[in-house]
Image (cartoon, rainbow, N blue to C red):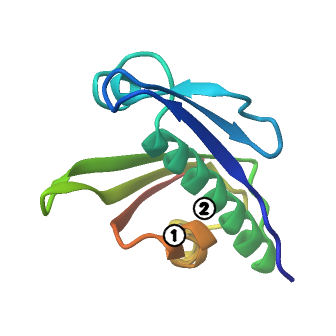
Amino acid sequence: MKINRSGSAVWSGGLKDGKGAISTQSGALDAHPYGFAARFEGVAGTNPEELIGAAHAGCFTMALSMILGEAGLTADKMETKAVVTLEQADGGFAITAIALTLTASIPGTDDATFQELAAKAKANCPVSKLFKAEITLDATLEG
C-alpha cells in the first residue's frame, strides 16, 4: 500500500517582510498565513514547527491506538502534546528535539504495560521515523 498526501506553501517577499500561506490537500488549512514573525517573534499565524508538532502528536496517538488494540485494550481518552525545538546549530537552524507528552485513560492496563506500549508507538509511528532529532516521551496513565 502506498498513500500520497500533500501540503503546499506560497511565499511572496523577503524573509522578514514576506508573507506566506500554507494549505493542505484536505482543506484543513486553506491559505493559512505563516511568516518570519509567526515563526520567530510570536506573532499570530502558523509555522512549520507547530505543524510538525501537530502531525507528530496525531501520528503517535493513532499508532498507540493501534498498538493498544493489538493488546486487547481501548483508550477512553488520550491527549498528546508535541513540543518541537528549533535552535541555531551548525551555522543555521535545526529541529533538535521533540518532546511528546501523553496523558491517557486506558481501562484494564497497568503503568508498566502502558509505558511499554507507548514507547513502542513512539519508536514506530511513521512521523517519529522521519526525524533525526531526539524524541522523548513522558507518558502518564490516569485512573
Q: What is the residue that sits farthest to the front in this orientation?
A: 13
Q: Amino acid at mark 2?
A: Phe
Q: What is the residue that sits farthest to the right in this orientation?
A: 1
Query: Which residue is the site of mark 1?
Result: 128
User: Whole-percent x and y of residue 31?
Assistant: 68, 28
Direction from residue 13 to residue 110 in the image, left or right: right
Q: Residue at x 34, y 22 (%)?
A: 37
Query: Which residue is the site of mark 2?
Result: 60
Q: Is residue 115 visible?
A: no
User: Whole-percent x and y of residue 73?
Assistant: 77, 68
Q: Residue at x 47, y 43 (%)?
A: 48
- Quarter-of-image position of residue 69: bottom right
User: Whole-percent x and y of residue 133?
Assistant: 34, 67
Q: What is the residue that sits farthest to the bottom in this orientation?
A: 1
Q: What is the distance, in whole Å, between disc 1 and disc 2 at their CAs?
A: 8 Å
Q: Are marks 1 and 2 in contact (CB under 8 Å)?
A: yes
Q: Is residue 141 above or below residue 33?
A: below
Q: Is residue 86 above or below residue 62?
A: above
User: Whole-percent x and y of residue 43?
Assistant: 38, 16
Q: Amino acid at mark 1?
A: Ser
Q: Residue at x 41, y 25 (%)?
A: 18
Residue 100 versus residue 92: which sits nearer the camera? 92
Q: Residue at x 71, y 33 (%)?
A: 29
Direction from residue 3 to residue 37 in the image, left or right: left
Residue 18 versus residue 44: which sits nearer the camera? 18
Q: Residues within 10 Å of mark 1 (few under 14, many from 20)?
A: many
Residue 19 versus residue 46: which sits nearer the camera? 19
Direction from residue 58 to residue 5 in the image, left or right: right
Q: Is residue 103 above or below residue 5?
A: above
Q: Is residue 24 visible?
A: yes
